[in-house]
Amino acid sequence: MLVCHCKGLTDRAVRRTVNSGACSVAEVTRSCGAGGICGGCRPAIQEIVDDASAPRTARHPFEGLELSAAR
């Protein structure tokens, strides 16, 4: 998905930048340029940064599902 229209950068490019160590929108902008021209993509960049920093927890694949007894 295209995130930064001004620079033609996709969410994959932004995620690569974040995975390489960028921890904020400003750091993403300094690294790849996304968000540096009009700023319209900054909220989307922030979502990608937040998603990357969210703790990952292991879940059982059936957690939260109600199982009924076989009849």
Image (tube, helix red, strand yellow):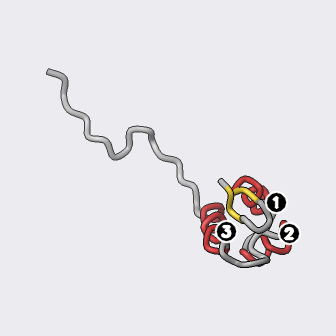
Mark earlier in primary sequence (3, 1): 1
For this orientation, the residue located farthest to the left is 71
Measured in 3D between alpha carbons, the distance from the residue under mark 3 to the one under mark 1, in whole angstroms, is: 15 Å
- Residue at horizontal 67%, vertical 68%? 45
Q: Position of residue 20 (x, y in %)?
A: 82, 60
Looking at marks 1 and 2 on the same chain, the residue that comes earlier in the sequence is marked by 1
Structural distance between the alpha carbons of marks 3 and 2: 13 Å
The image quarter containing residue 33 is: bottom right
The foreground one among 18 and 61 is 18
Name the residue tied to disc 2: 31
N-term-proximal mark, 3 vs 2: 2
Q: Which residue is mark 1?
A: 20
Q: Which residue is mark 3?
A: 45
Q: Which residue is painted at 78% across and 77% down in the image?
A: 37
- Few, some or many residues within 10 Å of mark 1 (<14, 14–19, 20+): few
Q: In this rendered view, identify the residue nearer to me: 9 or 31.
A: 9
Element under label 2? helix
- Mark 2 neighbour class, 10 Å CA radius: few under 14, some 14 to 19, many 20 or more: some
Q: Secondary structure at mark 3?
A: helix
Amino acid tagged 1: Ser
Q: Position of residue 71 (x, y in %)?
A: 14, 21
In which quarter of the view is residue 51 placed? Answer: bottom right
For badge 3, the amino acid type reads Ile
Residue that extends furthest to the top in the rendered view of this protein: 71
Q: Is residue 59 left or right of residue 54?
A: left
The residue positioned farthest toward the right in the image shown: 31
